[in-house]
Image (tube, rainbow, N blue to C red):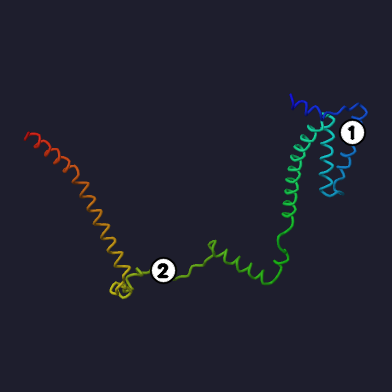
Amino acid sequence: MAKSKKINSFNLELNNKEVRILLTVVIILIIILLFRKSFNRVIEKFIVFSILFLLFLIISKNILITFIGSCIIFLLINLIMNYRNTIENFDNSLSEPPFDINLFSKDDIKKSGDSIKEIVKLVNGGIKLKDDDKTNVDNIGSSIDLTKLSDDSKPNALRDAQKETYELINTVNALKDTITTLAPVLNEGKKLMSIFESLKI
């Protein structure tokens, strides 16, 4: 009850003449808003808020409801306007080239471009095969003595540690296989022992 009294205290009594004046002001503000390119953004936002305020005032005839409603709608419209401006700025930045196009007309750039074209041709199957490329050759490894290149005779701590690690892994795997194999046999032995113990009783 107290809330409705507080809201009612902000009520206005508007006659038909005052409503017509307010509607005329709204229409004038809308016309002014159509020429918004000559204004800055602050004036544009002020005009939009004024239009909303006057329309809410005509509809609700309550200053508190008018102020709250116009603020909410204005914030939504302001959000949409900012989003639109962001998209327009982004489109404008895309229409302008990010670098100087005349850069490609320089001689150094043209030479580099021509050499890149030649490389692309070679990559696309333009490599010419020589007669040596078409003849069969014996196994390359047969003509090279690999024992001379091997360094197994030199001491190497890392290599020795790696060998020991592999041997340890193999031992653990063998142990695991042994345990897996013997597990059923041990279980059967345990059953037999329990049978013998029960027979002694």
Residue 169 found in image quarter? bottom left
Q: Could you say which is closer to the camera, residue 8 or residue 80?
A: 8
For the view shown, which residue lies furthest in the front direction?
Answer: 2
Q: Could you say which is closer to the camera, residue 164 or residue 94?
A: 164
Callout 2–callout 1 Cβ contact below 8 Å: no
For label 1, the residue is 22
Residue 15 found in image quarter? top right
Where is the C terminus found, in terms of image quarters?
Answer: top left
Tell me where residue 106 appears, x and y as whole percent.
70, 70
The amino acid sitting under disc 2 is: Thr
**Which residue is rendered at x = 52% and y = 66% of the image?**
127
**Which residue is rendered at x = 77% and y = 35% of the image?**
68
Tell me where residue 132 appears, x and y as whole percent.
44, 71
For label 2, the residue is 135
For the view shown, which residue lies furthest in the left direction?
Answer: 200
User: Helix, strand, or loop for circle 2?
Assistant: loop
Q: How many marks?
A: 2
Position of 131 relative to 21 (above/below):
below
For the view shown, which residue lies furthest in the top direction?
Answer: 1
Residue 104 found in image quarter? bottom right
